[in-house]
Each structure stands twice: as structure tokens, then as C-alpha cells.
Image (tube, rainbow, N blue to C red):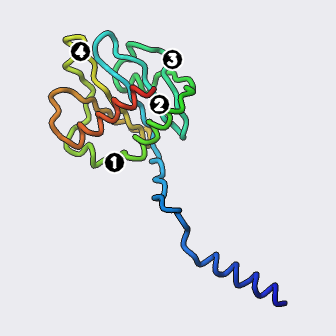
Amino acid sequence: MKHFSTLLLLFALLACSSPQTMGRQPVAMLPDATFIIGYTGGWGGGAAYKLEDGKLYTSVEQRGLGDADDIVKAAFQPLDSPTGLAAMTDLAKRYSPKTFTRVAPKFDCQEQAYDGVCPYIIVVKDDKSNAWTRSEVDKDQVFVAYMNDVQEALTKM
């Protein structure tokens, strides 16, 4: 009986204690959305990369994917890129609609007139998509910083 009481007390103590993080912050959960990034602009832009249900995909077509709606509907195939998956997961975890409150959804790239490209992000949630491109004319610092991270994630693909 003594061992049973000790075991019961141990169980009660473990059930009441707060979880230990070993000095690390709790991991942020991924938002319930699909994230697509890529470049649009000169020479048809480039491939699109999609994070959906924790898995990474790349567009079957590598150029000329069209506008944001076309990209959302494009065919994708699995992509085995641990660094790309980590970069996309990090973007998704840090995503906040507040980042985009001062920048209306847009999918244009003035730089394409000079064969330039612009990074974009498309967020699909509840069958509704919003797309943003970063351009040289953008001034909102929070938006530009996040879009710079999108560009950095693209280099990790």
C-alpha cells in the first residue's frame, strides 16, 4: 500500500506541474493556411513554392505561371528540400495579417519593365487567397522586412 500511495502522489505531482521548456520558448503553431512564394516579373518569373499541411511543394511549371489566381490553381509536386521546408515553416510561423494591414493585396511588378523580378507571397485560407508583391516603391517597413524574408526563403529553396 505504501508503494501505491507513493505512486499516486507522484502521478498527482506530475499532473499539476507546468511543462518544462528546458530554457527554450514553446514552438509556435503553423497557421491553418497555405503559403505560396516565388518571383514574378521579367522573363516569366520563376517557380512557385508551396507550404501546405506541413509539406513543401514546387510548381510543375518553372516559368510563366500567370497571376496569383493562376498560381494557386497550378499543378505542384513534392519538393525534398530540408532548408526550403525550414525557411517556409519559419515564414508561416511568423505570418501575421497585421504585417499586411497597410499594404493592399497586389500582384504587380514594375521592375519587370527592366527584366527585374519581385518576390511574392500568396496566403490561401478558407478558399480565399490574398497576394502581395514587394517592389522598389514599397515603403512600409514591416511589410518590406517580411517580404525580404520571403526573398531570403526563396534563395534557400
Q: Which residue is mark 4?
A: 112
Inter-mark Cα distance, 3 to 1: 28 Å
Which of the marked residues, 2 or 1, is nearer the chain's N terminus? 2
Which of the marked residues, 2 or 4, is nearer the chain's N terminus? 2
Q: Which residue is mark 2?
A: 50
Image position, residue 134 (x, y; %): 25, 30
Q: Residue at x 46, y 40 (%)?
A: 89
Q: Looking at the picture, does residue 40 appear above or below residue 53?
A: above
Residue sitting nearer the eye, 27 or 133: 27
Inter-mark Cα distance, 4 to 1: 28 Å
Which of the marked residues, 3 or 1, is nearer the chain's N terminus? 3
Picture quadrant where residue 39 is located: top left
The C terminus - image quarter: top left
Left or right: where 46 falls relative to 79: left
Image position, residue 93 (x, y; %): 42, 46
Image position, residue 32 (x, y; %): 47, 46
